[in-house]
Image: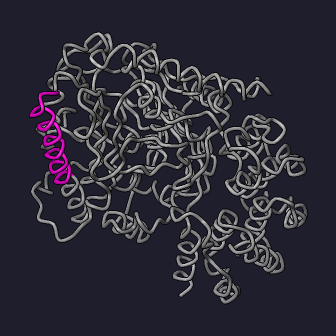
Amino acid sequence: MYYNFALLGRRIPFLFQAVVWGSMLTAITLAGEGDRLRPNIIWITSEDNGTELGCYGDTYARTPHIDRLASQGLIYTNAWSNAPVCAPARTTIISGMFPSSTGSEHMRSLVELPAGFRMFPQYLRDAGYYCTNCVKEDYNLKKPGKVWDDSSRKAHWRNRLPGQPFFAVFNITTSHESQLRKRPHRLVHDPARAPLPAYHPDTPEVRHDWAQYYDKLTEMDAEVGARLDELQAAGLTDQTIIFYYGDHGSGMPRSKRWLYQSGLQVPLVVFVPKKFRHLAPADYLAGGSSGRLVGFIDLAPTVLSLAGIKPPGNYQGSAFMGQFQQPEPQYQFGYRARMDARPDLSRAVRDKHYLYIRNYMPHRPQGQYLAYMFKTPTTQVWKKLYDEGRLQPPQTYFWERKSSEELYDLDIDPEQVHNLAAQSAERPTLERLRKVLHDHLLAIRDISFMPEAEMKARCVSCTPYELARDEGQYPLPRILKTAEMASSLDSQATPELVHALDDPDGCVRYWAAMGMLMRGKGAVDTVSSRLRELLGDRSPSVRIVAADALARFCGPDDLEQALAVLVDLADVSRHGTWVAMAALNVLDELDEKCTSVADRLRRIPATDPAAPARYRTYPARIRQSLFDDLQ
């Protein structure tokens, strides 16, 4: 359920207070009912793995402990992480809200929630639950006060008061991306039998990485078994609702970080003991499966519902278990924005049969250079073979410009390698899902259509969530329309984009200039005089896009002016981390065109010592990538 706060104006502070007081009254009521009425709840999570498990029909996998849990519980076959990478995925869970609506979807960002908004363990703690997290947080949101009773490597449900109900998270890192490429490693799974997706080349390096990934899943599975055993040894299994899930797709390239099933589909297994079967969903059957569409956006309201707490009104998901469970949603939504230091913006929606992806920056390839991703041998050999011209589709797609729209039939194309967006027979489905996505972005007031640097500049006395609901500061319908026209690459939209270059709002001008840039030299030439004027625009984000377009497609004089603007904005000490990152990304993409300004770049600061550690080094990383290319 979504609430259009933009229509409520000055009533918002009152609503925030109502949310807080409502949760307090609920907690007081529940505390008086006695702990015996409430289940313990445990989450066992694993990192960077999809549904490559025996209980999901993978015959190459060896995962006996999770398979045993599934034989006693229910597996969800249509579970999504909503975000295909760790920090935004966890942010979705802990806040019960889409990070694209709170300004927290960019990797390792750090923003505030509005006053009165709380993370879901805070409601559980108010209701008497002992809440622990072992161990990773990694949220893109600042915590609004004390969230956990204990969040550390020693956090454990054993440390609660006698008889106190608990909510405990145990996060297993064994299957993380960094572990599938560690060498030396003695393979247990036979690489000759490794199931390779159609988009990966068949090489010894790729087979080794996939086999090692499955080895790590077996090790992870043993750790899941150990957590289940300690619960059984304490005699608590029949009092505890158990969740097991992965945090997004595997760490292999084109899985983690991307809006395909390989990045978004996760395993989700739920066990409900007999005494709490009244809290289970209607389709619960031990050893069964559910096709219900569920996502990480639904986890917070579901846990609160299991504890008898009505989810607060600002939460954006649907409880699928417990006292306040809701009907199945027809769609689930995914999102991708900046990954580490590299900008991007894509959105996705799926129903039970189709996946639709809208790429708002189609000129950027899927495989933008990320130093962390390129440590994986599969990434290295895949890119090498592409550069040598030794690959054929679909193995080439990852390294090429994206399509503006992608549509996949999940029933017949489980790996999403056949884009149906241009097929006339699929036009009704394309238009339906396009509209569903458009309406969703407006409903949640998706703030990522404002450049990150612009968002930081405009959030002077408010949070990004509140900024997004201020139509004067963020005219989303107009901005979104411009972004859709820009990314469509439709020549018929060009005249309107030219007109939008003069819009009073910087975000509209930004997307209009992006539309010219993405259309290439012909479009840039027609507006080159206006782009030269935009080199002095009051918005640094607009200046950067204008400089990018002129540097790529115009003459030496324009290149010199554009580089001067970009080098100035790359100075983090003068313009801050977010502006510097945007400028440095353009300079990095210009490659040898930047040779003349390399010495100037070396003389300016690349790191803001006052910036939070989680993103402080991003500008320096981009600059180093540029210098490496110029050597």
* Of residues 15 and 295, the one drawn nearer to the viewer in this rendering: 15
Query: Can I make out residue 60 in this image?
Result: no
- In the rendered image, the quadrant that contains the N terminus is top right
* Of residues 601 and 38, the one drawn nearer to the viewer in this rendering: 38
Residue 564 higher or lower than 318, as above or below: below
* Of residues 104 and 162, the one drawn nearer to the viewer in this rendering: 162
Residue 467 higher or lower than 351, as above or below: below
Residue appearing at x 80%, y 35% in the figure: 471
Magenta stretch bounds: 214-236
Query: Can I make out residue 408 in this image?
Result: yes
Q: Write down the quadrant of residue 225 in the picture.
A: top left
Q: Write down the quadrant of residue 148 in the picture.
A: top left
- The x and y percentages for residue 367 are 47, 59
Instruction: Answer with left or right where residue 486 lies relative to residue 317.
Output: right
Q: Write down the quadrant of residue 575 in the picture.
A: bottom right
- The x and y percentages for residue 288 are 21, 19
Q: Is residue 264 magenta?
A: no
- The x and y percentages for residue 191 are 15, 57
Instruction: Answer with left or right where residue 5 lies relative to residue 420.
Output: right
- The x and y percentages for residue 128 are 38, 27
Residue 407 higher or lower than 538, as above or below: above
Q: Is residue 226 magenta?
A: yes
Residue appearing at x 46%, y 34% in the figure: 122
Residue 58 higher or lower than 6, as above or below: below
Snapshot colouring: one colour
Residue appearing at x 51%, y 62% in the figure: 614
Q: How many marks?
A: 0
Residue appearing at x 37%, y 16% in the figure: 322
- Magenta span: predominant SS is helix
